[in-house]
Amino acid sequence: MTHAEFQQLRDLPEKIVVADIEFKFDKDGRPNMTFRDVAVLNSLGWEVSLNGTYKPDIPAVSFNFSVHGIGPICRVDVNGTIHGSAGRTHKHDLRREEDARRNLPTAVARPDLEGKTAREVWEDLCQRANIQHTGRFIDP
C-alpha cells in the first residue's frame, strides 16, 4: 500500500464498524484487555481490521488498523511506550510502502489525546477517519 492509497482509505467517507468494541481479558490470565479482528467496512474493498489493547494498570490504550495481506497501516497509542520525541501518546501511520512490514516506525506526538478515556480516543479516531460505528462501545 502506498502513502497515497493509505490517505485515500483514511479520508474515504462512510467507513463502517458494525461490531461492538469490547476489551476483554484473555483466558491466559494476562493483565491486558484486548479485542481482535473487528472489520472496518469500506467502499474501496480493502480488508481492514481493527485490534485494540487496554492496559488497566497504567492505564493505556492502543487501536491498531491493519489491511489483510499488507499489515498495520495506522496505530494510536495513548500513554503507551515512549517513542522518542513523540512521547507516550502518539500516532503511527503508513508513510512509505515498507512501513507496514516495519510495524509503522514513524511516530507523531498526539498530546491532544493525553488523559482521554478509551471511549474518547475511539470517538476521536472515528471522527478523524470518517468511521461510523453502529455497534456499541463498552467501556473497559
Image: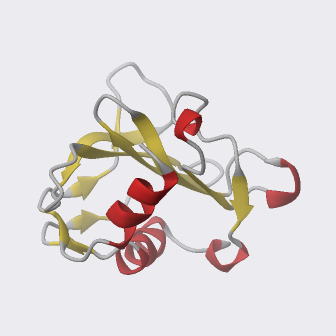
- Number of marks in the image? 0
Quadrant including the C terminus: bottom left
- Give percent across and percent down for residue 11: 36, 73
Which residue lies most toward the top here?
A: 28
The residue at the point 28 percent across, 71 percent down is: 12
Q: Position of residue 90 (x, y in %)?
A: 67, 60
Q: Quadrant of residue 19?
A: bottom left
Give the answer, above or below, for where 45 lies relative to 118: above
State which quadrant residue 5 falls in.
Answer: bottom left
Q: Is residue 78 left or right of residue 65?
A: right
Task: Determine whether 74 is above or below 47 in the image.
Answer: below
Q: How is the image coloured?
A: secondary structure
Left of 45 or right of it: where is 50? Answer: right
Identify the residue shown where x is 43% and y is 23%.
Answer: 29
State the image coordinates of residue 73 (x, y, percent, origin top left): 46, 46
In terms of depth relative to the viewer, which is nearer, 108 or 53? 108
**The N terminus lies in which quarter of the figure?**
top left
Looking at the picture, tell me which residue is in the foreground, 8 or 138: 8
**Whether residue 119 is situated above or below residue 98 in the rendered picture:** below
- Seen from this angle, which residue lies furthest right? 85
Q: Residue at x 51, y 35 (%)?
A: 100
